[in-house]
Amino acid sequence: MRPFLYLLLLLLATGCTLPFSSKSTLEQTGKCRELTHLGVSSMEAGRIDEAIVHLKAAKKVYPYDVEARRQLGEALWRKGDAQGAIKELQEAVKLRKEGADITRVAEMFLTIRQFQLAKEAALDAIDVEPENGKAWAVKA
């Protein structure tokens, strides 16, 4: 019974959050989403350098946000930084494996004439999402 009382006192003393949890995580994700939105808006307006600044800031605030990394990859691609774009999209895939993102990596590899890497990424996309027509097209 004593351990329960200690735990209860600990929770009450810390505002019902455990000492090893982070209240700032919500703040980080909120700030990250705000910066990602600014980055996407900048990219849509054709201000790619500005978009990259916002999206890199979003990634720095919360590096586990898939959308920030995905959008940063797209902005870097538009800027002409193929390797940076592919790296960011691969990081997004590590965080959450989605067929569309893997297919986008495959398309990028194909565009820069890295045919074997494109095929491998397309096969990975097909493993995740067998009906992914774009992945099948890249694989061919």
Image: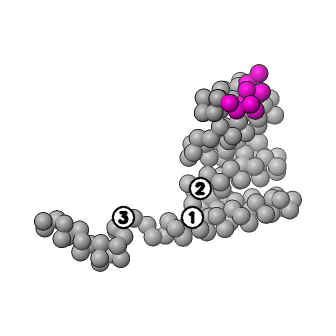
| Outermost residue to the right | 46
Earlier-in-chain disc, 2 versus 1? 1
Camera-side residue of 108 and 9 = 9
The image position of residue 107, as x and y in percent, is 76, 35
Which region is colored magenta?
Answer: 131-140
| Outermost residue to the top | 140
Q: Amino acid at mark 3?
A: Phe
The image position of residue 89, as x and y in percent, is 67, 44
Earlier-in-chain disc, 1 versus 3? 3
Does residue 69 appear in the picture of this structure? yes
Q: Can you tell which quarter of the image residue 117 is in?
A: top right
The image position of residue 97, as x and y in percent, is 58, 41
Mark 2 surroundings within 10 Å by alpha-carbon count, few (fewer than 14), some (14 through 19), many (20 or more): many
Badge 1 marks a residue whose secondary structure is helix
Find residue 20 and name its label: 3
Q: Can you tell which quarter of the image residue 113 is in?
A: top right
The image position of residue 30, as x and y in percent, is 59, 68
CB atoms at circles 1 and 3 under 8 Å apart? no
Q: Residue at x 78, y 31 (%)?
A: 110
Badge 3 marks a residue whose secondary structure is loop
Judge left or right: residue 78 versus residue 68: right
CB atoms at circles 3 and 2 under 8 Å apart? no
Q: Residue at x 72, y 45 (%)?
A: 85
CB atoms at circles 2 and 1 under 8 Å apart? yes
User: Which residue does the numbered mark 1 point to in the structure image?
Assistant: 29
Camera-side residue of 49 and 104 = 104
Q: Tell me, yes or no, whether the highlighted magenta stretch contains residue 138.
A: yes
Find residue 65 and name its label: 2
Q: CA distance from mark 1 to mark 3?
A: 18 Å
